[in-house]
């Protein structure tokens, strides 16, 4: 899938499909953070015209995704719970260098990887007959949108940095991403979120 060096564990889609409420809540928070991240990029790089221009578009699209996932949450008669964080994005962000212009390159490429991983998981969901047809269509549409975002972030990196530097750094970040989506603690974290939600539902 795209540039990724490994695939999400195959059990992920089965667990996600069997716990749609957790999936939707987790997904809504991811879209909210993607929109917020576009604002952060504008705040940090206001003089970079291409970045600002593209972030305006990404912000609108991610906020639209958030609105649509939130509508599905309400339709399922549940509500958004507190954001319990995203260890995957946090671990990847630890590799962002502190000094500019390295920082800008790393931020663009970490964003690209997060988009690529979302895209991979939406693709899995869009092909799963364990979820409803409506949800499959929704994830098919989002898959295309997130693939576009992946391209936007890598194109931006190539506008501001030489292609060979971008390629080399992307390879390094991919090596760090490789074990992340397979790590047991992330898997356990996801299962923990499911248990917490089940507890909440049983109490309400
Ligand atoms: Fe999105
Ligand atoms: Fe995105």
Image (cartoon, helix red, strand yellow):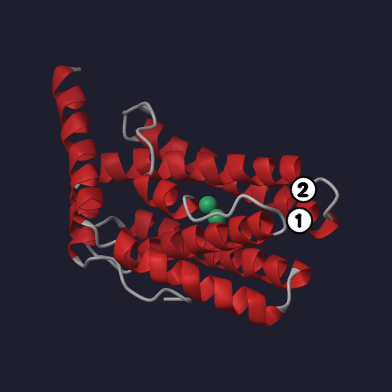
Residue 101 as seen in the image, left or right of residue 73: right
Is residue 25 in view from this perspective?
A: yes
Query: Which residue is depicted at the point 26% across and 50% down?
Result: 186
Where residue 37 appears, x then y in whole percent? Answer: 60, 44
Name the residue at the bottom extreme. 164
Mark 2 surroundings within 10 Å by alpha-carbon count, few (fewer than 14), some (14 through 19), many (20 or more) = some
Q: Which of marks 1 and 2 is in front?
A: 2
- Residue 148, numbered circle: none
Which image quadrant is residue 7 in? bottom left
- Residue at horizontal 61%, vertical 70%? 151
**Which residue, given by chain and number where applicable, does mark 1 sit on?**
51
> In the image, ligand 2 is in what quadrant?
bottom right
Mark 1 vs mark 2, CA separation in Å: 7 Å
CB-based contact (under 8 Å), mark 1 and mark 2: yes
- Circle number at residue 45: 2
Q: Which part of the image, by quadrant, shows the C terminus?
A: top left
Mark 1: secondary structure = helix
At mark 2, the secondary structure is loop
Residue 57 is left or right of residue 173, and the answer is right
Q: Quadrant of the N terminus?
A: bottom left
């Amino acid at each position: 899938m795209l540039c990724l060096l490994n695939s999400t564990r195959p059990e992920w889609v089965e667990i996600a499909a069997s716990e749609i409420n957790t999936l939707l809540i987790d997904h809504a928070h991811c879209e909210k953070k993607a929109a917020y991240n576009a604002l952060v990029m504008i705040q940090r790089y206001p003089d970079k015209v291409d970045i600002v221009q593209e972030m305006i578009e990404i912000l609108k699209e991610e906020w639209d995704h958030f609105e649509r996932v939130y509508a599905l949450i309400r339709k399922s008669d549940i509500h958004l719970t507190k954001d319990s964080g995203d260890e995957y994005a946090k671990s990847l962000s630890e590799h962002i260098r502190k000094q500019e212009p390295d920082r800008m390159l790393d931020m663009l490429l970490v964003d690209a990887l997060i988009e690529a991983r979302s895209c991979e998981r939406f693709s899995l969901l869009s092909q799963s007959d364990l979820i409803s047809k409506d949800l499959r269509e929704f994830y098919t549409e989002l898959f295309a949108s997130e693939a576009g975002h992946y391209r936007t972030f890598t194109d931006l990196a190539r506008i501001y940095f030489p292609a060979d530097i971008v390629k080399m750094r992307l390879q390094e970040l991919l090596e760090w991403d490789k074990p992340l989506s397979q790590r047991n603690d992330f898997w356990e974290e996801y299962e923990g979120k499911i248990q917490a939600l089940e507890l909440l539902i049983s109490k309400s």
